[in-house]
Image (cartoon, rainbow, N blue to C red):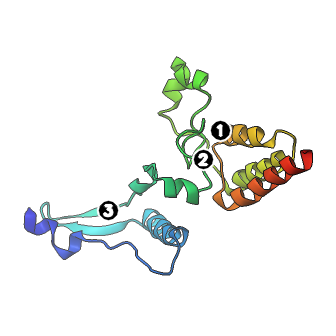
Amino acid sequence: PQLLKVAEFCVQFVSSSLHATLLELMQGVKDSIQKATNNPIIAFNVKYQEEVMLIPYDLFVAGDNPMQAEECSHGGLKCNYFCRTCKVGGTNVEKTSDEGYMDLFKCGELRTPQDTLTHIKEQIELAKLSGGTEKVKNAVRKSGIWDAAMATIINCLLDLGKVLQK
């Protein structure tokens, strides 16, 4: 068994680059997995002497890596909707109820780029209002969406609003 484990046919190098960003690498991995899912890989099982169908699955998506959260425009695990790929979650009251707790183990509605963009635009608009700091924090907590690229702009708007109010 040890010889089979280190044999060349059990090794699959995925990706590495000094120049590509994390999102570019992840897009390539996602495309490869999607291609193999749509057209499963046929291999030969030496032990049972028969063909097998390999359908890869990306287990790394389930991680709670802060860099993954940042790259996905997500607020992290402290948000009400803590999953980066779907809208599972809710308020603490909802999550601690019997039904809400059981819903945490189900896949929620998938997040979309358009939905993320809508929430980011909403946060920019909230930053322009009086008391914008709290409003933006509440919006992030409520939606689970926080874009690090827009953080600088939102912070500038909040600072400008404070200066103008004085």
Task: Name the image quarter holding the C terminus.
Answer: top right
Quarter where residue 14 is shown: bottom left
Report the mark closest to the observer, 2 or 3: 2
Q: Nearer the viewer, residue 43 or 80?
A: 80
Q: Residues within 10 Å of mark 3 (few under 14, many from 20)?
A: few
Q: Amino acid at mark 2?
A: Gly
Find numbered disc 2 in the image and state the secondary structure of the residue it sits on: loop
Report, in whole angstroms, how far the alpha carbon at label 2 lies from the one at label 1: 7 Å
User: Percent x, y for residue 101?
Assistant: 50, 25
Is residue 52 depicted above or below 106 in this figure?
A: below
Q: Residue at x 68, y 57 (%)?
A: 113
Judged from this view, the residue extending furthest toward the top is 98
Q: Amino acid at mark 3?
A: Met
Mark 2 and mark 1 lie on one chain; the one further toward the N terminus is 2
Find numbered disc 3 in the image and state the secondary structure of the residue it sits on: strand
Left or right of 46 in this view: 115: right
Q: Given contact means CB atoms under 8 Å apart, are the residues at marks 2 and 1 in contact?
A: yes
Q: Amino acid at mark 1?
A: Arg
User: Percent x, y for residue 109?
Assistant: 61, 42
Would you name the residue on which mark 1 appears?
A: 141
Quarter where residue 56 is shown: bottom left
Marker disc for residue 75: 2
User: Percent x, y for residue 29?
Assistant: 46, 68
Would you name the residue on which mark 3 appears?
A: 53
Q: Given contact means CB atoms under 8 Å apart, are the residues at marks 2 and 3 in contact?
A: no
